[in-house]
Amino acid sequence: MPKTESNRIQYTARDLVITDKDFFPIMDRYPIEQISDSVYRRIEKLACWFVLRAPMTEVTRLANPSLIDLFKTDIDPKRGARSINKSELEKAFLVPLDLDCTQFEFVYTRMSVRCQLIEKRLIANDETVFSDRTERCVCFVGKNGAGKEDSCIESICRHVRNGFAHGRIAIENDNDDPLIFIEDGTTPWNVDYQGEKHFGQKLEIRFRMVIKLSTLELIYQMLMDDGARL
């Protein structure tokens, strides 16, 4: 549990999901060099849009202007905006794509991430995540540069964008409809490592997703078509 020291909350490392920044074993089993040229081109197209055009003005000046403020609401997040954003995401993206809404979890505290990753079978970033072909996601909902809480779809865009930008992706070896694994995190802060020495840069996992490449392409297309606006 978090503890307060010097007026700051301290998180115990074992309560979070912290890994070495260079630790990404799924790439050993699924190196990107093994995918076909056609799948690689599909990845390039998605990566280009999410990195350059995703609707996050504080991240890129090339953000698609028609998608800014997607699912924004003036309601206090703790008084209903979170449930509104989740239901709108389900209605606009998950249900139309026949995705199981219960497999897409959005969390708002750092300590909630670990248990949800375990529940959704995403606690590891190795080849075991592809042993279950269920499309699923655990997404920490953060705040934008102005300090406002992201909506669910903005959170997904932000984390997917970071996963592509930092190369924390892996694609299941070629088949007709490959899965893609995407991971994102941030530098840990206020963490009590309980005397354990650690070397190298650390990454606190905030997002993991396993999804069909074709599903991610459909979500991208829905955003491009502006068909999901409120």
Image (cartoon, helix red, strand yellow):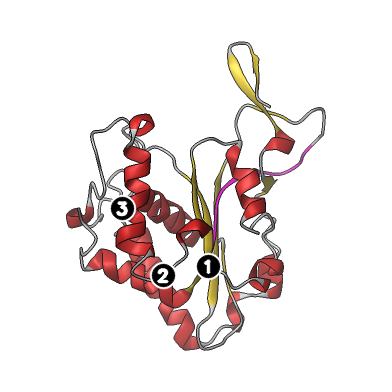
Is 202 in the magenta?
yes
Nearer mark to the viewer, of 2 and 3: 3
**Amino acid type, mark 1:** Glu
* Local crowd size for mark 3, using a 10 Å CA cut-off: few (<14), some (14–19), many (≥20): some
Residue at position x 64%, y 75% in the image: 31
**Residue 30 or residue 118, whichever sits in front:** 118
Magenta segment range? 198-209
Report helix, strand or loop for mark 2.
Answer: helix
Residue highlighted by disc 1:
135
Q: Tell me which numbered mark, 1 or 3, is placed earlier along the sequence.
A: 3
Residue at position x 75%, y 31% in the image: 193
**Residue 113 or residue 196, whichever sits in front:** 113
Residue highlighted by disc 3:
88
Residue highlighted by disc 2:
216
* Local crowd size for mark 2, using a 10 Å CA cut-off: few (<14), some (14–19), many (≥20): some
Q: The N terminus appears in which quarter of the rendering? A: top right
Q: Is residue 74 above or below residue 161?
A: above
Residue at position x 21%, y 68% in the image: 225
**Amino acid type, mark 2:** Leu
Question: Residue 112's quadrant in the figure?
Answer: top right
Question: Residue 64's quadrant in the figure?
Answer: bottom left
Residue 48, position in %: x, y? Answer: 36, 67
77 left or right of 141? left
What's the distance in space between the residues labelled 1 and 2, CA to CA? Answer: 10 Å
**Amino acid type, mark 3:** Glu
What's the distance in space between the residues labelled 1 and 3, CA to CA? Answer: 19 Å
Report helix, strand or loop for mark 3.
Answer: helix
What's the distance in space between the residues labelled 2 and 3, CA to CA? Answer: 18 Å
Dominant secondary structure (helix, strand or loop) of the stretch shown in magenta: strand
